[in-house]
Image: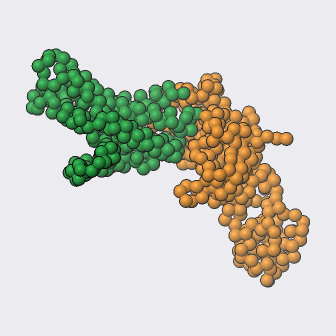
Chain colours: A green, B orange
Amino acid sequence: MIMPLIWKEWHEQRWKLAFGTVVLLFFTGSFLAAKVTTERELLVVIWLLGGLVLSLYSAMGIFAVESSNNTTTFLASKPVKSWKVFACKWFFGWLNFAVPMLACSLFMAFNVLKMGPEYIFGLKSIIRGTTATVCMATMFYTMTCCLAKRKSSEAYVGFTGLVIFFIFFVHMIFTDRLVEPALDNIDLFYLQEIFFFINPLFWFTQIIPSSCDIHVGILFIVQALLFAVVIWIGLRKWQRSC
Amino acid sequence: MPTNAIEIKDLRFFYGREEVLKGVNLQVPEGSIFGFLGRNGAGKTTTIKLLLGLLKPKAGTCRVRQIDPQEDEIAVRRLVGYMAEDQQMYGWMRIEQIVKWVESFYPAWDDKVTNQLLDMLELPLKSKVKTLSKGQNSRLALLLALGHRPEVVILDDPTLGLDPIARKDFLRHVIDLLQSNGVTVFFSSHLLYEIEPVADHIAILDKGVIIKTGKTDQLRENIRKFILIPKPGNDFGRISGLLDVVKAGNSVSLTVEDCDDAKLTIIKQMANNSVQETALNLDEIFEAYVIGNRGKSGSV
């Protein structure tokens, strides 16, 4: 019974997906052609644009649209498990930013292969950076659409996303400037890392090769747990919004 | 022994801290057209959502054809045809697309019935849902609720927002489609004149409690209105089953349920003149139960 859900979501999201992909590729192509910045800086800008702006835009148009159009009950009353509806909607929203980001990364990878080994950065850093930013965007997108108030409008979801971003931005500054130096001499290494890595913005540190010394495993575990909790909250909200 | 298509026992539900259903008990006989009456906010839509497994009750159970929606909501939704209050559908879909889309959820979908309904309800297949009038929208929602030949049809205030002509037109279709083929229809509304010609059973829900349920004819039989000029100092409160007392000048009208000879004698003793007895329509019965002052005015 998931096929009709996939059909519906594809028809609703395909133009958003196409729009995001075209805009991000156009942006990448234009900047590459204009040579106004280095390829590495450009890729970081694209990842940030895709990871934060597109994921926010995508989160606004997934669950809130059903509430705004009053179609939640119509959809929920169909003989299909609510988690399947939720998962299908979440996945198509995810595609809206993941596909444009992957498309840009492929475009850059193609350039890398074309330029040869003397090129400023390699395929490995593109793969690493893409994975990290898609993970960050996934967390940001999931938190925005799952933590927004039940039955809220697109604008309210967008506002929630901005609040979440602001909180994590402040958290990052706080950990960077205040907590990290203070904890340097205390033997609380894992707790300290858990406190740091609750913030999805830390995925971004994975782009820079110099920061490889942080424990990726702990980052992954903490973020996976956070993701599971947020998804559970989102599913409960979806089930209760009927 | 007749079976029940829907059974609700001690159903309780809270929205936040507010208790919206306070132990609802209801039996809907198989094959009946059941009018579920109540004012706006009485808890009708909540009860229906609980029947479909869209909400979880705080306490109590409900069953649709012996299936508990909390245990198997998919099975319940497959045998129920549901039309929501002011049902909105996907505006970007064409009618033929939305019919196909809904069809794919139901293994028992009947194309023959759907085509008959499409002809009967005069729906333009190529039109987009967003271009439909309210009347056409309701007819489409009805079609989507009936295409899989459901055994139980739940209509939640289906004519909400329709003009009087569209409302009559819609009800005519409902009656034509459902009255003859033994389907159980659970029809919620706050517009009583809608229900009156159609329903053979009714239940009145008020503030989360069922205050009256029974056959429509019996209800009409059992409730009587008496108009009299009372003797001074009468205590109407001693009339058991008194639903409403309305004073108009020096006369009083009393609405009484389960009216028998004994009660009639008491009422006659209270009157200064002859007592005029009248039957009530469903509208007046509903009003007496829901907003009647139940003899609170006491003596006159």
Q: In percent of the image, x 41 and y 40: which residue is there? A: A225
**Residue B38 seen in this snapshot:** no
Figure label count: 0
Which percent across, then down, holds residue A110?
A: 21, 19
Q: In percent of the image, x 69 and y 42: which residue is there? A: B63
Quarter of the image for residue A103 reads: top left
Instruction: Name the foreground residue: B116 vs B82.
Output: B82
Quarter of the image for residue B205 reads: bottom right
Q: In percent of the image, x 37 and y 46: which residue is there? A: A157
Instruction: Name the foreground residue: B166 vs B58.
Output: B58
**Does residue B114 lie above or below A220 as drawn?**
above
Q: In percent of the image, x 74 and y 47: which residue is there? A: B27
Q: Is residue A148 left or right of residue B270?
A: left
**Residue B244 seen in this snapshot:** yes
Q: Is residue A55 left or right of residue A4?
A: left
Which percent across, then down, holds residue B66?
A: 72, 39
Instruction: Name the foreground residue: B226 vs A51.
Output: A51
Which residue extends farthest bottom?
B232
Which percent across, then down, holds residue B160?
A: 57, 48
**Does residue B207 lie above or below A83 as drawn?**
below
* Quadrant location, the N terminus of chain A: top right
Which percent across, then down, holds residue B170?
A: 61, 41
Instruction: Name the foreground residue: B212 vs B226.
Output: B212
Quarter of the image for residue A60 reads: top left
